[in-house]
Image (cartoon, rainbow, N blue to C red):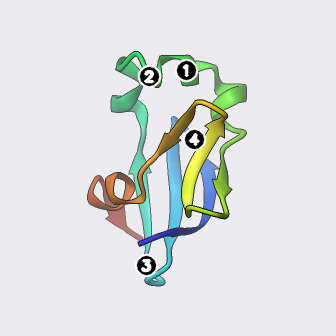
């Protein structure tokens, strides 16, 4: 499974379109407590998420990404 599209919503939520055609909303706020994601509390940085086209994952910078499976499993259908 890959991410085909992502957009940022209010309050650290992501709207994610998967390669299956499904669209889910994932609340990313619970992940911000972990050291690997703590820097994403900076809203400007969080809002700069993009898709790594080679791997189909959501990224923020050269050190931070999240697996599509996490977004799918922790998201709810639109």
Circle nearer the viewer, 1 or 2: 2
Classify residue 43 by image quadrant: top right
Tell me if label 1 and label 2 are in contact, CB under 8 Å: no
Q: Earlier in the sequence, mark 1 or mark 4?
A: 4
Q: Position of residue 62 (x, y in %)?
A: 66, 34
**Relative image position of residue 25 (x, y in whole percent):** 43, 58
- Assign a secondary structure to mark 3: loop
Q: Nearer the viewer, mark 4 or mark 2?
A: 2
* 44 relative to 10 in the view: left or right: right
List x then y, in percent, for residue 77: 35, 70
Numbered label attached to residue 41 = 1
Residue at horizontal 60%, vertical 44%? Answer: 59
Q: Residue 63 in the image: x percent, y percent? A: 59, 30
For residue 10, the mark is 4
In whole angstroms, how far apart are the C-alphas of marks 3 and 2? 27 Å
Q: Which mark is residue 22?
A: 3
Q: Are marks 1 and 4 in contact (CB under 8 Å)?
A: no
Mark toward the start of the polypeptide (4 vs 2): 4
In the picture, which quadrant includes the C terminus? Answer: bottom left
Label 3 close to label 4 by CB (< 8 Å): no
């Amino acid at each position: 499974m890959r991410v085909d599209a992502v957009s940022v919503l209010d309050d650290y939520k992501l709207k994610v379109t998967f390669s299956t055609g499904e669209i889910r909303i994932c609340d990313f706020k619970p992940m911000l407590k972990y050291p690997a994601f703590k820097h994403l509390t900076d809203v400007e940085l969080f809002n700069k998420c993009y898709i790594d086209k080679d791997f189909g994952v959501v990224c923020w910078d050269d050190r931070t990404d999240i697996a599509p499976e996490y977004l799918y499993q922790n998201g709810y259908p639109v």
